[in-house]
Image (spheres, helix red, strand yellow):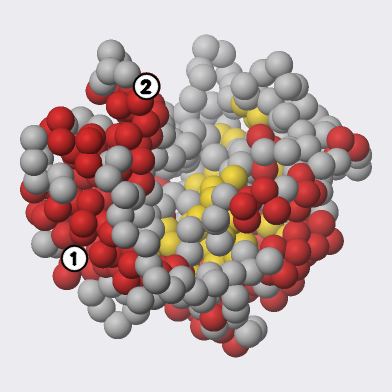
Amino acid sequence: MNKTTWALLSAALVLSGCQQAETEVVASAVQPLPQPSVQADIYQDYLHRDVRDDIFYFVLPDRFYNGDSSNDNGSTSKPISAGGFDTSSSRGFHGGDILGIEQKLDYLQNLGITAIWMTPLLRNKAIQSDGIAHHGYWIVDFTEIDPHFGSNADLKQLIDSAHQRGIKVFFDIITNHTADVIKYQECHQASGEFIAPQTHCEYKSLAQVEKGDSYTPFVPQDQARVKVPNWLNDPRFYHNQGDSTFKGESSLNGDFSGLDDLNTADPEVVSGMVDIYQNLIKEFKPDGFRIDTVKHVDLSFWQTFSPEIVNFAKAQGIPQFHVFGEVYDTNPNNLSVFTTQGKLPSVLDFAFQQTAADIFYRGKSPVLAQQLFAQDSLYQDDDSQADLLMTFLGNHDMGRTGYFINQAYPDVSSADKLQRSILSHA
């Protein structure tokens, strides 16, 4: 019995035990399941291991472990990527880095994980008006590792060390936007600061733009060439329509909290992004990508990007290279659009997360799971299927298991809360 089959059987047994009263749901977690007679070593042959046999550990490097305190303040030569170190602030850099992850690989392996997914490591604009880039999502250079986290050589060494242990490494990547560099004459001073009392740039709809009611984009003189590759410095490759309201067309065309929103329907942008990430695959040999803000990118972009990236990785000798996207939506009808029409092999299964949380943390009927699984065929096509979806119970955006349990059952015992967590993870 392979690991995948065992996991499915175990899940079925646990869920079948949930068809009782709510008090029995918690109690069933303490009943031991039979152990498989043979368990393959999941750390053997990582290169050919099916992603469905992987257990991911999601790590925000800055908050994990500081392996090299000399890089805490970032770049010593590029001011845009320097500073922000402040352990007293929840928004500042705290010093964690790539070497810190490498130094803790034995610890991670002892947890039983087989794959590491890291938040973006590429060089960021370290400080913006709304915070500090400890998370890595404000990229200015798509070819270089952010000096707060280490160097390109450090990342190669981490990947080699992980692979020696049979652990895969996944990159978190961004195609929707870059750091906030482009400004608008109607909202900003020449220096890039807002014209008081403005604190944001109101979204301009396509209808407004067609009538001539549009923004005049510019790049402050001292930041004219900060983005790499150079084509990213040209405002014509961006929508330049102001801040997204995250509704309607603005979800695709608006700036994500001021971040420069790429026009991902432009063939030159598609080609440029394909080149960027093919080069990263060639240089670092990661095992796959988690893609940020997928639903804010034009669907036609994914139809080209995903197959070209996966095929390129396979040609580089990574046969199980896997791509999964973040589509923050709990409706399988909407999620499946990106794995079928959008040609992504997988997305994060937000529908599963909501269903599991409703059943195990909010006391709702296990029939919800039956209703969810009945929609699995929506994901079926030549390169994707429901069991390739990335399942999870909580994340850095919404909260985690303990948070949900405390919300729903603040007054139950700690032992009860623990059993709910154990059962949901099983």
Q: The residue tagged with tag 1: helix, strand or loop? A: helix
Q: Is residue 211 visible?
A: no
User: To which residue does mark 2 refer?
Assistant: 414
| Image mark for residue 174 | none
Q: Is residue 341 left or right of residue 101?
A: left
Sooner in the amino-acid sequence: mark 1 or mark 2:
1
Give 217 or 37, whichever is nearer the viewer. Answer: 37
Give the quarter of the image for residue 27: top left
Q: Nearer the viewer, residue 279 or 321?
A: 321
- Labelled disc at residue 376: 1
Please tell me which residue is depicted at 76% across the width and 45% down the height of the picture. 100
Element under disc 2: helix
Name the side, left or right, on which 241 lies relative to 408: right
Q: Quadrant of residue 274?
A: bottom right
Q: Residues within 10 Å of mark 1 (few under 14, many from 20)?
A: some
Q: Which of the 4 quarters of the picture holds residue 277?
A: bottom right
Q: At which x and y percent is residue 302?
A: 41, 67
